[in-house]
């Protein structure tokens, strides 16, 4: 009996000691988090410019606008937003996400959401409210554009176009209700109505968007996983000898002068469609017969030599200049033409030509350059191609041989028309 009493007393003392230790730890946690911290107004610039702590230490900062919203700054440079609040009577931290994966405003919204849940008796740490927030696909796409595409992709406008044209069915659908079967059905419809290349590009876009959703904590799984792209053949289509006369005839008879000139410039320069659409008078020097493209698809600038036919066409358009866009549009948001596909279809129909894309005009120029004796380096320079092996050679080439090569190729095309006539 003596041992039993001593055991009970010991157990009671241990329980009291454990409770005291817990309170001591919680109290010191509270003090430690307040120690060596600063209150600042969280902004992107302020957060980016915070001095890094010494190795092995963490600096804590709190936002002046949202009570409890904090930032942990590690010596490695990692910056993590958190909410520091008492949850169920105990001080605790709820991680909201890393900066810049989530912005300051997103961190504030997440903090307000978590504070509301705590007031309702919900532990956001257990429920993972922020991570499990269900977005509409339209909301996710806006996140994708703002946090990734516009910042890191040169072709972000193409993503926006694909979203607007092909993904309307998902606009108001919650992202956790978009399943693999929905993607497969979309892919099949795109194959039937828009072709395998469009189907593959949209699948690639969706895969990236849902991967970003997982990275940002909005989803656990990517519904695109396991869906294969359609097999693509390497494309080598360009305008053939017998098609050239019909193509030029249909192009010359096109009533829309803006698009007619647009397609001519695409062919005469070999420039990418997106660059020609955004062609700006400020970047054109007709006296030197040069067009400066500030940024191409590969992220670099390019100077395109303008052959006499292109210069003559541009001088003609300059007479009716209204603003800085060479191919202006009164209906588009950008101010320049954006969607030439309908006019392109009409021209091909009138020419009796099938399976020819606007991008094939670029390939057509390169093919005719090759046919008239240009080497691969000259063709690469004129089309703005970049390869590791050719970079050094490009740097030594001036525009004169490039302009000569392009002019020779264009003359050969026009001569074909004259022969047929």
Image (tube, grey):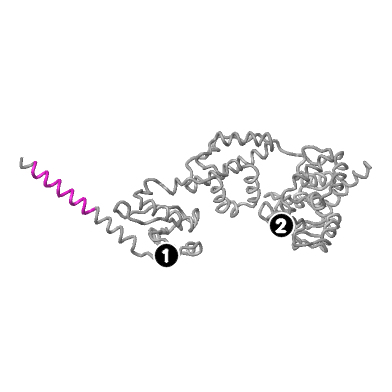
The quadrant where residue 40 appears: bottom left
Tell me if mark 1 has few (under 14), some (14-19) or many (20+) residues whose alpha carbon lies within 10 angstroms of its own. Answer: some
The quarter of the rendered structure image containing the C terminus is top right
Instruction: State if disc 2 and disc 1 touch (CB < 8 Å).
Output: no
Tell me if mark 2 has few (under 14), some (14-19) or many (20+) residues whose alpha carbon lies within 10 angstroms of its own. Answer: some
Mark count: 2
Q: Position of residue 121 (x, y in %)?
A: 34, 49
Q: CA distance from mark 1 to mark 2?
A: 42 Å
Q: Is residue 150 left or right of residue 309?
A: left
Say which of 85 and 25 sits in front: 85
Q: Position of residue 376 (x, y in %)?
A: 77, 47
The majority secondary structure of the magenta stretch comes to helix
Q: Is residue 18 left or right of residue 144?
A: left
Residue 395 in sight in this render: no
Say which of 172 and 217 sits in front: 172
Residue 210 in sight in this render: yes
- Is residue 412 placed above or below 77 in the rendered structure? above
Q: Is residue 96 magenta?
A: no
Q: Is residue 15 magenta?
A: yes
Specify start and end residues of the magenta stretch as a single range.
4-21
Say which of 210 and 120 sits in front: 120
* Residue indicated by mark 2: 335
The quarter of the rendered structure image containing the N terminus is top left
What SS does tag 2 mark? loop
> Counting residues from the N terminus, which is met first, the one under dot 1 or under dot 2?
1
* Image point (40%, 52%), residue name: 114
Q: Position of residue 134 (x, y in %)?
A: 48, 45
What SS does tag 1 mark? loop
* Residue indicated by mark 1: 64
């Amino acid at each position: 009996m003596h041992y039993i009493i001593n055991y009970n007393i010991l157990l009671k003392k241990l329980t009291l000691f454990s409770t005291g230790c817990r309170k001591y730890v919680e109290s010191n946690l509270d003090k430690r988090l307040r120690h060596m911290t600063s209150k600042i107004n969280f902004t992107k610039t302020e957060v980016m410019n915070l001095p890094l702590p010494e190795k092995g230490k963490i600096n804590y900062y709190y936002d002046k606008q949202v009570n409890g919203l904090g930032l942990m700054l590690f010596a490695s440079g990692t910056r993590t937003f958190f909410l520091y609040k008492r949850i169920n009577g105990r001080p605790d931290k709820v991680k909201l996400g890393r900066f810049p994966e989530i912005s300051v405003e997103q961190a504030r919204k997440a903090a307000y959401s978590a504070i509301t849940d705590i007031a309702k008796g919900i532990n956001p740490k257990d429920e993972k409210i922020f991570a499990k927030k269900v977005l509409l696909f339209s909301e996710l796409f806006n996140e994708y554009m703002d946090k990734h595409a516009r910042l890191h992709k040169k072709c972000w406008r193409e993503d926006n176009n694909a979203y607007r044209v092909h993904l309307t069915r998902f606009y108001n659908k919650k992202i956790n209700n978009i399943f693999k079967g929905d993607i497969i059905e979309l892919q099949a419809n795109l194959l039937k109505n828009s072709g395998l290349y469009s189907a593959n590009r949209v699948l690639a876009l969706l895969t990236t968007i849902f991967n970003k959703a997982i990275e940002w904590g909005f989803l656990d799984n990517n519904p695109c996983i396991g869906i294969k792209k359609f097999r693509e053949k390497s494309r080598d289509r360009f305008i053939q000898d017998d098609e050239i006369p019909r193509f030029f005839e249909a192009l010359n008879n096109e009533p829309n002068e803006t698009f007619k000139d647009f397609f001519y410039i695409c062919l005469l320069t070999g420039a990418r469609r997106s660059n020609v659409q955004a062609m700006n008078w400020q970047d054109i020097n007709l006296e030197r017969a040069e067009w400066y493209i500030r940024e191409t698809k590969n992220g670099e600038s390019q100077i395109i030599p303008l052959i006499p036919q292109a210069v003559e066409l541009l001088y003609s358009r300059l007479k009716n200049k209204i603003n800085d866009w060479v191919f202006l549009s009164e209906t588009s948001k950008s101010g320049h033409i954006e969607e030439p596909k309908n006019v392109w279809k009409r021209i091909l129909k009138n020419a009796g030509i099938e399976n020819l894309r606007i991008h094939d005009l670029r390939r057509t120029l390169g093919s005719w350059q090759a046919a008239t004796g240009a080497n691969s380096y000259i063709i690469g320079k004129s089309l703005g191609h970049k390869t590791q092996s050719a970079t050094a050679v490009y740097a030594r080439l001036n525009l004169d041989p490039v302009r000569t090569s392009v002019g020779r190729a264009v003359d050969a095309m026009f001569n074909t028309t004259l022969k047929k006539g």
